[in-house]
Amino acid sequence: MSAPRNAAAGVKRRVDALLSSLDDALSIPVPAANPPAQTAISPLPSKSLGGGPSPFSMSSGSPFSLAADTPGGAEPAAPAAEPAAPAPTGLAAIEAMLKEQTAAGPVPVVSLAVCRPYSRDDYLARLKTFSSAGHWFDKPDGATPPECARLGWTVDGVDMLVCLACGARVKAPTSDADGATAALLRQLADAHARMCPWSGNPSPTTFCALLLPPRHGAPPALPQGAAHARDALRARYAALARPPSAGGPRRLPLLAPAAAAEALATGASASGRADAAAFLGALLHFVGAPAAAIAAAAAGETTAGAANPYEHERVRAAAILAALGWAASASVDDAIECAEDARTVGLWRFARLAPPSARPAAAAPAAALPARGATTFGVAATTMGAPPAPAAAAPAAADAPPFDPVGEHRVWSPWLRAEEGDDAPAWARIVALLLPTAAAPPAAAAAARPRDAAAASASFATVLALM
């Protein structure tokens, strides 16, 4: 046992000697191996054996100095660091994150660079890039803006499409030479990058249409159900009929008489009503118009014969515009829009309705109605004659035309599209599907006008019998 013990003692002596020689070379006093608990450790000297600042010193003159030299050799004292606030945890951390996001602005709910084919909001955002119709004009049926947006494309200049997910581009041909149109239709489906999420993964075809096609002899159906279409129609009417003080349009446009009459006749035919007056009365009742307006419309009264001509014409215009897919613009003041057309129309371009107090003593005659579709890049139908100036027409410039609620739609608008096997445009078929077979206005509507109450009641009863 003595031999290992002696060997360990020899090793310890050699280690102690080596440490002593190092301490002497560096002139650093080392405390005893087992110092008392009260003994303080000596600070490191600032000078090495060479007499200059130690290369390991943090004082001035050393390459590791943290403070710049000051006159007189004094070093400025570092300011005391403020204690860090404790990081929020739990509910406090969530609230702090929400406050930061609110301060940075609203989080976008749509994205053009993300592939979410089943998001209708994303689809409408892509479609909105086609709002300048001159950028994608006169394209074949398979390359309309709704179809391009459904396949993941956005417009980026004249005749140029881009996919913001993969960066692929498609240039539309300027003519149909050598099958260029067929090549364009193929590119819409195949031009995405190989790993692009839009490749073979388009949005549903129902996004491009307002109705499902008829099957097995049944009429077209509403893809999102009757409740959704009903609420949307009523919301459009309520926003259009809302007074300006409550956020509605400043003044609704004067509808072109011939265009409005044609729309009402189309709606009556699609819904099985006897005439335009019966259809208008049922439509006003469905959207929740005032009882007096319902009774006057169902009785076939004209604007001039109504007790309140301005209110009669305003309610009538709001209902027709809402039925045709128009809504008050949420982004442009004094404008209406059609989201499915990516179209916003400023009402300052058209003649307006105005209350009696705003009418001049002698109203200027209304301008001639432009050709149907003239404002939608030259898609033509018939040029309508100059309509008479109704009593509710607002003062307008001589060249301010009335508003054509059908002609102002895009030529590819899903509101004007008739499904195969159906002769009614989509807007008329939607209203026909929503209206009950016999829309009975409230009984009090017959007595809404005190004068000539008996005649009004008889007319109203006749209309109900025909509905």
Image (spheres, rainbow, N blue to C red):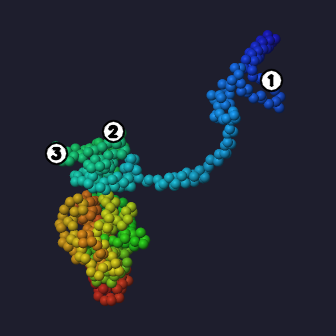
From where the camera sits, is residue 413 visible? Answer: yes
Instruction: Identify the secondary structure beneath mark 3.
Output: helix
User: Looking at the image, how many numbered discs can be counted on the residues?
Assistant: 3
- Image x and y of residue 460, in percent: 30, 82
Residue designated by label 1:
32
The CA span between labels 2 and 3 is 28 Å
Above or below 42: residue 344: below
- Image x and y of residue 455, in percent: 29, 88
Q: Amino acid at mark 2?
A: Arg
The quadrant the N terminus occupies is top right
Res 123 label: none
Instruction: Identify the secondary structure beneath mark 2.
Output: loop
- Image x and y of residue 410, in percent: 26, 60
| The furthest residue to the front | 71
Q: Residues within 10 Å of mark 1 (few under 14, many from 20)?
A: few
The CA span between labels 1 and 3 is 100 Å
Res 177 label: 3
Residue designated by label 2:
194
The residue depicted at 55 percent of the width and 54 percent of the height is 99
* 125 or 211: nearer the viewer: 125
